[in-house]
Amino acid sequence: MNSNRHHFFISVWDKYLSVIRILLKKSATQEQVLSINRIDFERAGATNKSGYRFTVNFVDGRPDALFSGNDLVQTFISVLSSDEVINDHLLKNNYTFTFTSKYQLHIKNTLIKQTKNCPHSQKKKYSLANKSSINIVLYHTQLY
């Protein structure tokens, strides 16, 4: 790994780390997109005519593949894993991060693993036009 590029990519990802934290939380309800300034990559001469692209799936807090030889992805994983708040989210849920050639980072929560039923759960019985009845249990879930 080229140490100059490595240092450069770390500084780029560090710049967006606080926004990524917020978007991770918001991804519980829908996919989030972060537009990253293309100039951040061009300033250090790290340009790629076709743009940079990658997809990283985090399962149980760890990436599901090795990305040897790809400084951009390796530094992204390193920066995310070194942040305590983000690492906690990565352990609790599964995420897919997709970086597109348009310099957009898509964050998708692919599995909300921990939910707890509250003591306020309600059981109700409904009749369907006097033909039959069904039991419906309504649960209030909390995301952690």
Image (cartoon, rainbow, N blue to C red):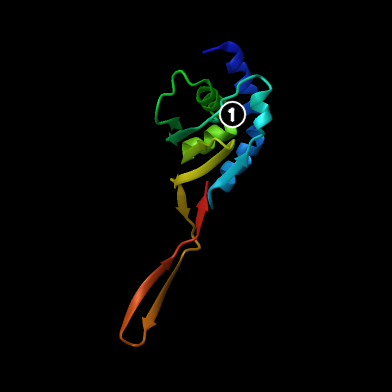
The residue that mark 1 highlights is 83
Q: Estimate the x, y position of residue 118 in percent, counting from the top left.
A: 49, 57
Crowding at label 1, few (<14), some or many (≥20) Cα neighbours within 10 Å? Answer: some
Task: Name the foreground residue: 54 vs 121.
Answer: 54
Quick check: can you spot residue 15?
no
Q: Estimate the x, y position of residue 6 in percent, counting from the top left.
A: 58, 17
Q: Residue at x 45, y 35 (%)?
A: 58
In the rendered image, the vertical position of residue 17 relative to residue 3, given as above or below: below
- What element does badge 1 sit on? loop
In the rendered image, the vertical position of residue 22 relative to residue 79, given as above or below: below
Task: Name the foreground residue: 17 vs 137.
Answer: 17
Q: Estimate the x, y position of residue 93 in percent, counting from the top left.
A: 47, 41
Task: Name the foreground residue: 138 vs 97.
Answer: 97
- In this image, 93 relative to 14: left or right? left
Quick check: can you spot residue 131?
yes
**Given the current orientation, which residue lies at the most extreme left position?**
131
Q: Looking at the rendering, which quadrant does residue 63 occupy?
A: top left
- In this image, 65 relative to 99: left or right? left
